[in-house]
Image (spheres, rainbow, N blue to C red):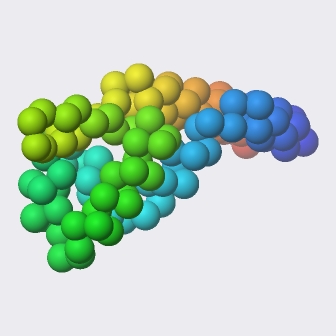
Amino acid sequence: MLYCVFDLIKLELKLKRTGKILQPLTALAEPTRRRIVELLADGPLSSGDIASRFHISAPAISQHLRALREVHLVKVRPAAQKRFYELDQEGVEQLAQWVNDLKRFWSTKLDALETALRK
């Protein structure tokens, strides 16, 4: 069990070194932002289309979109008078890679725990 604690400490230190991963997670902790990301998973939408799907003001949606842009989960493309938002593939892939690394970490530890418990 002590090894698991040391590995968690190493994982935490790695996260602090690559602190960028915590920012997208913090942004996604807000339910409106999670829903925006889910909407954009189906394809680009204008800011007006996004705002029309929520019961909050357009300026509030703009603030959420800005927060998602700042952590590289969405990007914006101006087209005439509209602004279209879409997922930022690079930022989403970095987040997915972190989740996969975390899953591998816990799979290894849980397998070791299962082996130890069976003994």
Q: Quadrant of the C terminus?
A: top right
Residue 115 in picture, x, y percent from top left? 70, 32
Q: Quadrant of residue 20?
A: top right
- The image quadrant where one finds the N terminus is top right
For this rendering, which residue is in front, 39 or 68?
A: 68
Choose between 109 and 73: the one closer to the eye.
Answer: 73
Taking the image as shown, residue 42 lies to the left or right of residue 59, namely left
Of all residues, the one furthest to the front in this rendering is 81
Q: Is residue 38 left or right of residue 99?
A: left
User: Can I make out residue 94 in this image?
Assistant: yes
Rendering coords of residue 37 (x, y %): 29, 47
Q: Residue at x 43, y 64 (%)?
A: 30
Residue drawn where x is 32% and y is 68% of the image: 60
Q: Work out whether residue 115 can be spotted.
A: no
41 to the left or right of 25: left
Name the residue located 48 percent from the left edge and 33 percent from the top edge: 95
| 46 is higher (above) or lower (below) than 80 | below
Front position in the image: 80 or 14:
80
Q: How many marks?
A: 0
| Percent of width and height locating residue 47 | 18, 52
Q: Which quarter of the picture shows residue 54?
A: bottom left
Identify the image quadrant of residue 34: bottom left
Q: Residue 62 in the image: x percent, y percent?
A: 31, 58
